[in-house]
Every structure is written in C-alpha cells, then in structure tokens.
Image (cartoon, helix red, strand yellow):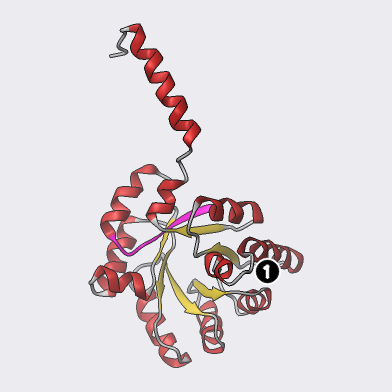
Amino acid sequence: MKLFLDTADVAVIREMLPTGIVDGVTTNPSLIARSGRVIAEVIAEICALVEGPISAEAVATDFETMVKEGDKLAAIAPNVVVKLPLTWDGLRAARAFSDKGIKTNVTLCFSVAQAMLAAKAGATFVSPFVGRLDDHGADGGELIEAIRVLYDTHGFETRILAASLRHPAHVEAAALAGADAATLPADTFKALVKHPLTDKGLDAFLADWGKTGQSIL
C-alpha cells in the first residue's frame, strides 16, 4: 500500500522525505488555508520535492469552473492529481479530465455506490473517508473492503485511496481491507513506528550493552 502525506506544510514534507516511505502528498483547501500561502506556489514547491502523485483540489462546485481550475492546477506539474468532490458536477469533471489524460482524485466518498460512480467516471483515485464514517457509527474499514470487492469483481482500474485516517489502527485496517494507498497526517505517520514493546526491548538492549563497557566506534 502506498503511503501519502496529508499536508500542505513544505517543512513537514522535507522532514519526512528522507525516510523513503512517502509515496505522494495530498492537500485540500483547509490545509492550504493553514499554510497561509498561495495555492499554486505551494503545489509547485511540493511537486518539485516529491515525485509521486500530488493531489491539488479544485474548490469550485460547478462543472465549468471545476474544469478551468483543474486545468490550471494540472498545468503546474505532471504529477498533479486534480482533486474533485463526489458530486454530479465533480463526476462530470472527472470524466472530462480522464478524457484528456489528467489524473483525478474523487474525494468525500462514503458509500459503495459513490465509489462505483467515481470508477465509471474514470477517476484515478477514489478517497473513502474512514474516520468520518467512524464518527457516525459506521465502519470505514468495511467500506474499503466492499469497494475492493466491487472494483476487483468488475475490473475497475480506479485506485482506493483511504483518507481521514487518524491513528495507526485506521492505517492497518485500510491496508488489510485492500486499499491501494492511504493518506495520513505527519503525526499519524510517525505513530506507525511506535510500540511500547519496541521501546522496552530497545531499553533492555542498551542497558545490557552498557554493562559491557564496549564501543563499536
């Protein structure tokens, strides 16, 4: 499963890139607003740093303006993926971009039916929101699993990009359910490596090593 960093903070991206496990970046209007910067400048800088897919969101709600905004975003760099809402106009725009060879990420998916429509519209990615479903008593992992079955059964090429992942258990569930990729904020990314038994084991190793009085260097 590919791991994308969900941020518009270039400093955070620079910090995480040396790990070698960041496969792409997703942004949204809220993240851009927090950055306090011009969207085109932020996207261009991120695209120069990361070779993988960079999702940049069109903010219009009507088809015509979505397409204009998406064209402008896609022109920034070849790895830009135009992010669109899962609405009728968003699906129309996804088809228009697909016909032009521009990659899209259809976001705010909360049902199998919506995921089916996104795939039929030619979306490159569909983003089911795991955490937000959990907030409403549903199981986001089960939705990803159902979308996986749907796509595999019917040969849809749209990739499942699990979003709204708030803790390691969400990431694990997405991976086990068959998501092609997951996008997560830096703090969740960093939490994936943590386990109390790892820390306990390392402390024990270091204590034992200290008793030897040796140095490897």
Span highlighted in magenta in the image: 2-9
Residue annotated with mark 1 = 156
* Residue positioned most to the left: 37
Q: Is residue 148 magenta?
A: no
Q: Secondary structure at mark 1?
A: loop
Along the horizontal axis of the image, is 93 left or right of 187?
A: right
Kindly identify the residue that appears in the image at 67 percent across and 73 percent down: 112
Q: Residue at x 58, y 66 (%)?
A: 134
Where is residue 147? Give x, y as percent.
67, 67
Query: What's under tag 1, amino acid-wise?
Result: Phe
The one nearer the camera, 120 or 147, is 147
Residue 213 picture quarter: top left
Q: Residue at x 63, y 69 (%)?
A: 138
* Residue found farthest to the right: 153
Nearer the observer, 178 or 121: 178
Q: x and y percent of residue 18 in the render?
A: 34, 44
- Left or right of 49? Residue 126 is right
